[in-house]
Amino acid sequence: MRTTRRALIGASAGLLFSGCVRKKQESARAPKSGNERKPAPDFELKDANGKTVSLADYKGKVVLLNFWATWCGPCKVEIPWFVEFEQKYKDRGFAVLGVSMDDEGWEVVKPYLEKNSINYRVLVGNDKVAQSYGGVESLPTTFVLDQSGHIAGEHQGLVSKSVYEDEIRQLLDARSTRLNRGTYASVTGANHT
């Protein structure tokens, strides 16, 4: 099934590039409001060190969840942005989590990680996880998750760096505001909702 899915994803690559401008315009908006957000499906996958990682491990952080592959042209454009975001925002409660959909698994992913100095955690995905996120029929497919693990943004294909960064900043700013309110409430005994 993975080979068939890879063929479908590869065949759609031209469509993704031709639709980039339209997608960019559709995506250039604020993240979904709280009541529009659905919980991101949890999963457990192995990282490059063989450690089992759960999406639930990232609750409390803003997460950029990126489904990608080493052979995917648009993915290669985005990865340096994600490396930069990880470095720039990690201390504010942000993390990038990459899910490789390469059929060959770690055999091709590990060398790619080293060659490209990827500084964020990468996992090797499977069809079950892809299906839980709506099928992930094109790469890259990226979800931006709020600190409670809900999907605030979803992007199929290549969108601009500024679209991702705007969403990340808005969610981090909202996270900081909530944390500050909680600190104020605990210090003063006030109950802010």
Image: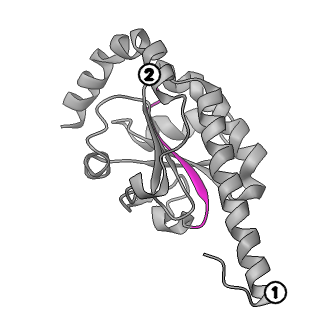
Distance of mark 2 from mark 1, alpha carbons? 45 Å
Q: Which residue is rendered at x = 35% and y = 59% of the image?
A: 41
| Secondary structure category for the residue under label 2 | helix
Dot 2 amino acid type: Lys
Residue 113 image offset from top left, x and y in percent? 60, 38
In the depicted view, which residue is nearer to us: 85 or 178? 178
The correct choice, above or below, for 140 with respect to 147 in the image is above
Q: Earlier in the sequence, mark 2 or mark 1?
A: 2
Residue 187's disc number:
1
Q: Residue furthest bottom?
A: 189
> Which stretch appears magenta?
60-71
Q: Is residue 35 magenta?
A: no
Dot 1 amino acid type: Val
The residue pinned by badge 2 equals 23
Residue 54 seen from this side: no
Say whether marks 2 and 1 touch (CB < 8 Å). Answer: no
**Quadrant (top left/top right/bottom left/bottom right) for the N terminus:** top left
Left-right relation of 76 to 189: left
In the depicted view, which residue is nearer to us: 183 or 190? 190
Q: Which residue is rendered at x = 51% and y = 64% of the image?
A: 51
In the depicted view, which residue is nearer to us: 30 or 148? 30
**Quadrant (top left/top right/bottom left/bottom right) for the C terminus:** bottom right
- In front: label 2 or label 1: 1
